[in-house]
Image (spheres, rainbow, N blue to C red):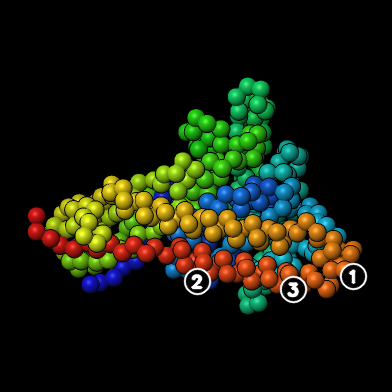
């Protein structure tokens, strides 16, 4: 039987258009590092972006490190004594890909601040593009747009008119970032409209205060960002049989969202030999149709099959959350003054170096566990059958 590994991660349709799709190419073994402001930092609290990325590209064995820091700006990144510059930590993590999140904090300066933002962002992009963090080549960079502010019910934040004014500024800074990215030859991941569409579609608030996303908000934002990164088409597995009469499909794991439910699972297989085909999971038939219908795509309704993929996806997200917390405790240690600061000598030089090494080992072990969990154990067979 011809084997084909088919990938899926369910996404919303809102977000970057095909014309604005990222040209960022992910490679096997890439380490992606998130750098920027509070919006970027809080991705680690929910795990939807990282688990979705790993589930979408299980064969690439990707890993993610969140180096973002609340309130960071392009030209203002204060740190504790002797913590070290961002470059130092990107090098320590061997960054292959750097996703930059800037513009939200800077937007409070309004129109008057736009020239400085453009200059500072351009300078930052030029600097990062000249570094070698992974020991062999400069990082591949993508710039992520700011997101809009959400208007909340009366009495829970700024009024609607004030939020509208804020969003004018935020969009102006997003467009400025787009222009700087184009000038620098860096992919621009525009998620502004995708997140705005989620705000409009959901009856419940997706932020805790109009500015910072809640768990459901990060689920939506993660899906929009993944779409901007050219993760496979929304809610579908698309495969080619290349004229064969049977093939194997390995569906991806499905990390469930905050409501515990995934999106539809739709499978399309083109170039089947003429005939009637059944999709089997062991002895269970999940769907059956003619080759033409399979080419158009069929929605898989079988709840036990979906549940198995969801259970695996939930396990993946739990490992991602565990790893993210351990890395945060290592990267942003509460006793950093003893590890790298003023009391490193004489206290920290004895006990903390081996403890930091052990943190790194544990994080690396969880990377491997996540990579294994991202590969679905499910193998479904599509085979020609009699009606």
Q: Which residue is mark 1?
A: 345
Q: Nearer the viewer, mark 1 or mark 2?
A: 1
Residue at 59% x, 58% y: name it.
322
Q: CA distance from mark 1 to mark 3?
A: 15 Å
Image-quadrant location for residue 232:
bottom left
| Residue 200 in view of the camera | no
If you read the primary sequence from the N terminus, does the residue marked by circle 1 or circle 2 appear first? 2
Residue 146 visible, this orientation: yes
**Pointers 3 and 2 in contact (C-beta within 8 Å):** no
Q: Residue at x 22, y 56 (%)?
A: 284
Residue at (68% x, 71% y) in the render: 358
Q: Secondary structure at mark 3?
A: helix
| Residue 307: image location, x then y, percent | 36, 51
x then y, percent, for residue 220:
51, 44
**Upstream in sequence: badge 1 or badge 3:** 1
CA gap between label 3 and label 2 equals 30 Å
Which residue carries the number 2 mark? 28
Q: Is residue 205 above or below residue 177?
A: above
Determine the CA span between mark 1 and mark 2: 41 Å
> Looking at the image, which residue sits at the far front?
351
**Residue under numbered circle 3:** 354
Helix, strand or loop at label 2? It is loop
Decide if residue 79 is on the left or right side of residue 118.
Answer: right
């Amino acid at each position: 039987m011809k084997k084909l590994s088919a990938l899926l991660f369910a996404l919303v349709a809102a977000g970057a258009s095909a014309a604005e799709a990222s040209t960022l190419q992910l490679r096997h073994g890439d380490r992606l590092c998130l750098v920027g402001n509070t919006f970027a930092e809080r991705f680690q609290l929910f795990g939807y972006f990282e688990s979705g990325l790993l589930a979408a590209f299980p064969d690439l064995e990707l890993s993610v490190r969140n180096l973002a820091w609340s309130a960071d700006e392009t030209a203002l990144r204060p740190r504790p004594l002797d913590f070290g510059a961002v470059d130092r930590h990107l090098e320590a993590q061997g960054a292959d890909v750097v996703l930059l999140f800037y513009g939200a904090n800077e937007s409070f300066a309004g129109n008057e601040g736009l020239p400085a933002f453009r200059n500072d962002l351009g300078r930052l992009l030029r600097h990062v593009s000249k570094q070698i963090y992974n020991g062999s080549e400069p990082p591949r960079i993508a710039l992520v747009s700011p997101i809009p502010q959400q208007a909340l019910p009366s009495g829970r934040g700024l009024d609607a008119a004030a939020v509208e004014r804020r969003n004018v500024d935020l969009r102006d800074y997003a467009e400025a970032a787009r222009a700087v990215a184009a000038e620098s030859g860096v992919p621009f991941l525009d998620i502004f409209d995708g997140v705005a569409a989620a705000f409009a579609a959901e009856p419940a608030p997706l932020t805790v205060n109009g500015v910072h996303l809640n768990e459901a908000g990060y689920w939506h934002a993660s899906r929009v960002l993944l779409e901007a990164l050219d993760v496979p088409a929304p809610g579908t597995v698309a495969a080619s049989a290349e004229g064969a009469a049977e093939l194997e499909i390995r569906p991806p794991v499905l990390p469930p969202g905050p409501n515990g439910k995934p999106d539809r699972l739709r499978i399309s297989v083109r170039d089947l030999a003429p005939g009637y085909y059944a999709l089997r999971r062991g002895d269970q038939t999940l769907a059956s149709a003619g080759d033409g219908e399979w080419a158009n795509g069929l929605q898989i309704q079988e709840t036990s099959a979906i549940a198995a993929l969801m259970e695996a996806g939930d396990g993946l997200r739990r490992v991602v959350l565990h790893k993210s917390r351990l890395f945060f405790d290592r990267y942003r240690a509460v006793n950093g003054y003893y590890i790298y600061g003023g009391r490193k000598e004489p206290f920290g030089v004895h006990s903390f170096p081996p403890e930091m090494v052990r943190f790194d080992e544990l994080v690396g072990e969880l990377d491997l566990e996540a990579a294994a969990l991202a590969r679905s154990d499910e193998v479904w067979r599509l085979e020609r059958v009699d009606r």
